[in-house]
Amino acid sequence: MENNTNFSNCESGNLNFHAKSFVVVNCALNAPLMLVSILGNTLVLAAIIRTPSIRSPSMIMLGSLAITDFLVGLIAQPLFIADELIMKNHVLNVVSSMIGFALSGISLATITVINMDRFIALQYHLRYATLVTNSRVICSIVAVWLIILICLGLRLWDNVGFHLLSAIIAGVCLAISTLCYIKIYQIVRRHRLQIRSQEQATRSHIIQNRTEKMRLKQSALNTFVFYIFMIACYFPAYIFLFLFGISYSTWKTEWTISSTVAFMNSSLNPILFCWRVRQLRVAAVKTARDMLCTTTN
């Protein structure tokens, strides 16, 4: 009997050791991601603010995304790390989860709006300037924030229902983004076929057609890159949100991992957009140089 007790205590000790080790590793992963998110999104915001020539509806959306991702690194991730290290604190757990849900949800919804904007730019390129205006973009961003914050109130009354509603919102965002990418691919493919047939009919517009073909190809590739990283970061969290909503199981370890992966998207976004969007990349490099020169002086 005593041997069984000792074995149980030893096994329990090993489990506690592994759990604590996992917490330390997870916090160690979040710390550099938090710094990258803060610095990267600060640079993107500074580049947009300091470069009036690149301001457009698309850049306003990127600016809004940068603000949200900056807040993820500044507020959500530090609270997440504190909640992991300081266990069994109900108030901290509730505050951390609500802020994390809100900011991650707003970030995902904003990326979805950006994907819709790219689809509209290709599908209605002649009417784009009249369809997508700065005022409409700002209204859309405000609507995203209000919808997510209103849904967040459900967390205080019905935790399971809140997880299910969050899963539905995340699923809708992922589905809309997937549909937008499929449509973008079809548009680009159709345009490339049209350009090819025009080249065969006449050789006078070959250079113009090739330029248009490269532009469409670049736009589709950019959208595809953003889409793949978005799916990779948010899909695990979506799965566990849905499981939380239909059952009372917690999957603490798995959910913690999926939260870290979702937070990772806020660190990747400024890198991806500076890499794929030339205007933003040039403005960000110039802003970084100006800030370094100012600091040196």
Image (tube, rainbow, N blue to C red):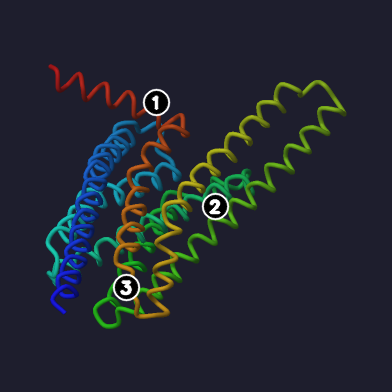
Comes first in the chain, label 3 or label 1: 3
Q: Amino acid at mark 1?
A: Val
**Badge 1 density bin: few <14, some 14–19, many ≥20, Cα 10 Å:** some
The residue depicted at 34 percent of the width and 47 percent of the height is: 266
SS for dot 2: helix
The residue depicted at 32 percent of the width and 23 percent of the height is: 286
Q: Position of residue 55 (x, y in %)?
A: 40, 38
Indicate which disc residue 23 carries. none
Between marks 3 and 2, how big is the CA–CA gap? 44 Å
- Residues 126 and 153: in front is 153
Q: Position of residue 20 (x, y in %)?
A: 18, 57
Q: Nearer the viewer, mark 3 or mark 1?
A: 3
Q: Are marks 3 and 1 in contact (CB under 8 Å)?
A: no
Question: On the image, numbered disc 2 is attached to which residue?
Answer: 131
Indicate which disc residue 250 carries. 3
Check the image and report above or below for 58 versus 297.
below
Q: Is residue 14 left or right of residue 150?
A: left
Question: On the image, numbered disc 1 is attached to which residue?
Answer: 282
- Residues 103 and 31: in front is 31
The residue depicted at 43 percent of the width and 64 percent of the height is: 238
Q: Nearer the viewer, mark 3 or mark 2?
A: 3
**Badge 2 density bin: few <14, some 14–19, many ≥20, Cα 10 Å:** some
Image quarter where the C terminus lies is top left
Q: Are marks 2 and 1 in contact (CB under 8 Å)?
A: no
Q: Amino acid at mark 2?
A: Leu
- Name the residue furthest bottom: 157
